[in-house]
Amino acid sequence: MKKLIEQLEYDLGAGSFKSKSRHKLSEERATLLYFLDVYNKHLFEIDTHPIRRVREELDEFTRELVNPEKNDIENVLFKLRQFFSAYRVAEYTYIRKTFEDFKGIIWNFVEQLSEDFQNEQASDREISQSLAQLKEAVESDSIDLLRAKSREFIDFYIEHQANRESRRAKRMKGIKKNLDMMKKQLVEADRNLKLDHLTQAYNRRSFDEHIRQQANLCRVSGTPVTLVLLDIDYFKRINDTYGHDIGDFILKECVRMLKESFNRETDFVARIGGEEFAIVLSETAVPLCVKRIEDLMAKIRKEVFVTEGTELRFTVSVGIAQIEPNESVESWYKRADLALYHSKHSGRNRYTVAEPAQKAA
């Protein structure tokens, strides 16, 4: 909560906006701020409600909640209800459409298989009928009828087998094509669920799953895993000065540099908030992690980013924590978050290694 307030230039200690009169943040407002912050981190990219626009609206609600001059919380709640009524309909429609698309992929595949099986059953019935006619010829005691039906059956069976092989080859080709298409569509759908739409880093949902997997793996294997939380310094100032398009450009450039610096197959880079990122380094202890972070920060400090004729620079603040034996994921994340908080409040543009779990507690 402190981090959220500080991003909005709200002085939590004084309980007021900087340069404003003193004003306490009520429990009701703090609860709403927490709700908005959590919701902000788990948004869907919807055509009618792009994430960036939704975040701007949520940020505006947040500013109203922390503004000491806005005493009418009922009016804020009314506008919030209006917003969420519209957004939840769009969100539900998006989820239903995604689910229907998935069902359509599976249904088309099932339909093709059903048609193939029906064709095979029809072919088998023709064979059964031909065999029945041959049996009748055997029982008729007529050599001429038996000779004619035998030739007819042999010709039919040879043709039937040739057609069956042809159908089988065609069917297998069609099934393979459909399976490849279905696999591609499912992989794409899964990818879209795992990645942040803007930066193509992993999203918050993927991060939450990944750190739990890594924590479990560490308990079993004993190999070190280190979590890095990283925040772009004064990002709000960049947005306010240059606009959100430039801000988006900086976010994408930051992820590009993170991926270049942490490019091992096991390295995991995620965007977990507006300008906050996480890096999970498996089989990496703190000393090696610190070395890699120092290299990254030096690279970022030297970089000049140019877009739309504007030259920009930025720095980052970092918190580092290696998971300890039998430590919970919540404790691990909190230590890294406190280390990041310390970096930001001791001058920014630096990293802090977290205190041991026992000392932090």
Image: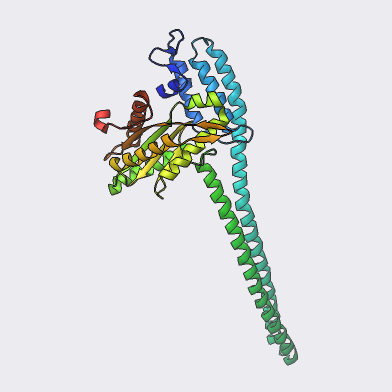
Quadrant of res 131: bottom right
Image position of 341 with respect to 128: above or below: above
Image-based side of 339 in relation to 79, left or right = left
> Residue, x 53% and y 13% (percent of image)?
73
Residue 206 seen in render = no
Which quadrant of the view contains residue 244?
top right
Residue 97: horizontal and vertical position, in percent?
62, 41
| 307, 110: nearer the viewer | 307
In the rendering, at what x and y percent does residue 277 appear? Answer: 43, 35
| Residue 193 point in image, percent of width and height | 52, 42
Rendered residue at 32%/41% (across/down): 291
Q: Is residue 173 at all visible to an observer of this figure?
A: yes
Front residue (pair 228, 131): 228
- Position above or below: 167 against 156: above
Q: Compared to 167, does 239 lie above or below?
A: above
- Residue drawn at x 63%, y 74% is 165
